[in-house]
Amino acid sequence: MSAQKPHLWMRFGQPLEVVIDDFETVFDGWQAGGVGAVVFGRLLFTGADGTRMSVPSFDPNPQVYRDLDVEPPAAPTEKLPERRKQLEKVLASAKDRGLELYVFCPDAGQGKGGTGHTLADETSLRARVARVRDVMEAYPMVDGGVLDGPEMGYEITPGHRSYLFEDMPETLRDKATDLGYDFDAMTAARDRMFTRLHNLRSAEIDLRGDGGFLGMLELFDGDADLASFFAFRRAAMMDYYRRQHEALSQMPRQAKIGVGSRLPCFNPLTGSDLGVMGGLYDFILPKLYFYHRGFDGFYGTIGRYIQTLTEWNPGLTDAHAMKVIEALLGVRLPWVHSRLDLDLGFAAEGFETFVTSETRRMLAAAPAGQVVPWLEAGREPHHGDPISAGDLHRIITAAQDAGLEKCLYHSHTLLTPGEWSVLSNLFGSPWHDGMAGYAPPDDLASESHSKRP
Amino acid sequence: MKFWVFAFNPLERYMDNHKAIFDAWEDGGVRGLVVGRMFFMAEDGSHIPAIPQDPAAYKHFGLEPPEPTPRDEAKERALAAMLDDAKGRGWPVMVFDSGPPAHVQSLINRYPQVDGVITDGPGENHYELARHHGGELFELRAHERTQFGDMGFEVDRLERGIGKLRESFHNLTPDRVRYHAAGGALAGLLLFDIDEDGLYWLRARQQRSVNNWRQARADLDKVDRYVQFGGIPRITSWSSLTGQNYHEMPQYFDVIFPKHYYWHRGFDGMYGTVQRWVQKFMEWNPTLSEADGFLLMKSLFGLDLPGVNSLIDLEMGFPEEFFTQLVHSETRRALDAIGDPEKTIFWVSTGRYPHAGDPMPARDLEGILRATQEAGATRFLFHPDPDPGPAEWTILTNLCGKPWRQSRDGYWPPDSRQPDEYLQPE
């Protein structure tokens, strides 16, 4: 850990109004609690009809889009001039206070792209970059932006929005050829993997599951084209991130850009290579998301894998499914033998094992000052099961012990008093209930399925 | 363990689909039902009483019936059908609602399925040092003055006792706290300088609780059949202050539901109450440390929270020892005092918003239930807040019934977002 006190980044947005309506109090509270950088957005205001996040916060500059030969998005019909002024005042105040400022998803609201695959289509890439440039020029006081995605699928459950077995459409064929991969051979290998995952036997898992990388390869019949399937995912993704980086570096106004990924253990599936990303971008933001259920949470994905593998292989126990998962992802959760164990939460050694090892892996990809993982906990993290303030503390301290210096709390809107107490104790001056001034909002996500009593 | 569930407002969410819900609950091990409060939701968000006040019942008690209130007879029939369904499964049915004899008579006339009524916090005196949830420890409200006067207590003396104690609570010093706090009850008398007037007040509070229960039981005995009486006191450690003496309760109550409420913040949770007390002690006595505040809690209530020596420790959640030591001890004390495990049903709540408090993950629910069972309890009621989630339902069904497994077409506890993949057509 460097001599400098670790600092916290805070994201607000969804909606913006919670902060911008009372920003002096909020910023005072945040800075006392150790917040050194603010990520805000998406850049959408609540409309006059009360619909949250429905009105873009600025008019697009058509010249930016013309320069990149893409169509500009439509200008909002509702202008909300007072809101716009207020946002600019908030951002100016943040800069005056010495806070770093980043826009979350500065690509959101981009104009029409092309019809090809996101990772291959040049028009779509230019449309994205044009929007980022437009945002950076509309808000010259910001330091940069934080992009979220794209990424390849990482779930094996059919119908999941990130379904691994349906993320290689025909629109990637030419890209595969350009990068030197045999598209048909790879997709055939993917289909064989799908079939293989429907024909798992316990004895075979016992024989090969603990055999490391080579043992796992044996479980999949030493399928060389399967290795190509995963190699291509990384190659296509990193090709995209390189082209995006080159395009962003052509912007007249230079801005710091950060890019995210899931936890390192999932990245061989998603195609994200944090080493490459850390070399190209100003900072990387892997997701320290551990909750069960919901989406993008570590336990949730493991639970879905167990559920799917045991459905596909009715004779398979949860424990054997778990062995396959551990072999595939390189994680070790010896206290998880069944789905029930996931419902029982995190074992004490979990923080010292998977939090530590995943943090070390991300720190191996880039210098600590460049690694700012997303953190998410609370009542309903990404629609998942609650993560207590105590577990948030244990996650952060394990990550800090592994060398982490910075992290980004996902959504200020949902911040609970317990979480703020923990965060401020770790990063700044401890906050406690009843203090004058700032109090965390403890609101629900607008799309929450839960019902506060 | 035998598992009851609390179906609370809006009741419509259960009434509209009770067969499928009860099937899933029965599979999961549910063996009893508490329903309430007894109102329906109108479209404009207002409440419509679920109990039509029966003029004949009022006439029987020599009372003028109240003005008729709006009714929703279709919903009354739906609620009655739901209660029939519960009774058909052999479940006891109790209502989270009580009142004077004519009210209870009206209730059982309309819903003959009801076995009993439940009062939340029966006879409870204030237990928070800070003004919280409508009251504070050191106050005597107008109606309480009247009650104590009617019971024969000298109100002036009660006021003197309160005033003296309030003063003592503002004059605590680290040396005195550290000297006396570990010294048991007698040292506690010295630490808080509790005099005869203070004891008089504490005794009056206990007596007021007993009077409340006696009156409630007598009222229930006036209706035309036996109606069971249930009460939900705070857990044992607080009962010396709330006046809810577990040893006295069984003679008035058929069922006692001790609150296994442990969350931080919100109201009625143990961690939340402890934090408020410690903060108030420090506010009133600026020389005290947080550790002194916790010593005072130990002196007053015998509370020694495992792993907790400072306020930030409360944010860390519940270590395993919390369940094996503290929950176990609270359970055992309640069972020993009540003397009948069959009439002791621990009222358990966790989840995303337990009484507006901090979330308690399913692991905490499992810890509470495991400790409760190991301490000898045979029954509990789950109070979902606001709704049971999939993790909680997994824990409950694993302990009490057929373990729930999520599936595309099966039962989903209401606080669930079905996974994306289940929302797609197969």
Image (cartoon, rainbow, N blue to C red):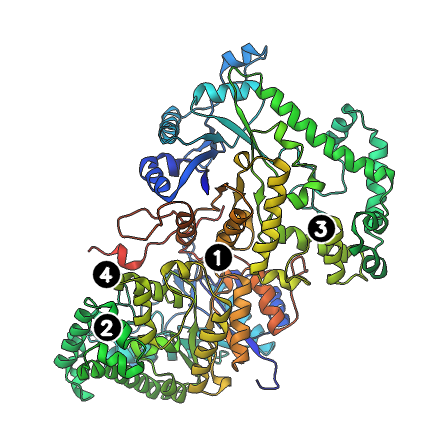
The numbered mark at residue A46 is none
Chain letter for the residue marked with disc 4 in the picture: A
Chain letter for the residue marked with disc 2 in the picture: A
Q: Position of residue A345 (x, y in %)?
A: 46, 61
- Give the label, 1 or 2, closer to the camera: 2
Mark 3 on the same chain as mark 2? no
Question: Dot 4: few (<14), some (14–19), or many (≥20) neighbours within 10 Å?
Answer: some
Q: Position of residue A96 (x, y in %)?
A: 60, 77
The numbered mark at residue B302 is 3
Relative height, residue A183 to residue B4 (above, below) = below
**Which residue has dot 4 on it?**
A315
Q: Position of residue A190 (x, y in %)?
A: 18, 75
Going 73% across and 30% down the picture, which residue do you hit? B207
Q: Quick check: can you spot residue A71?
A: no
Mark 2 on the same chain as mark 4? yes
In front: B135, or B305? B305
The amino acid marked with disc number 2 is Glu
Relative height, residue B320 to residue A110 (above, below) = above
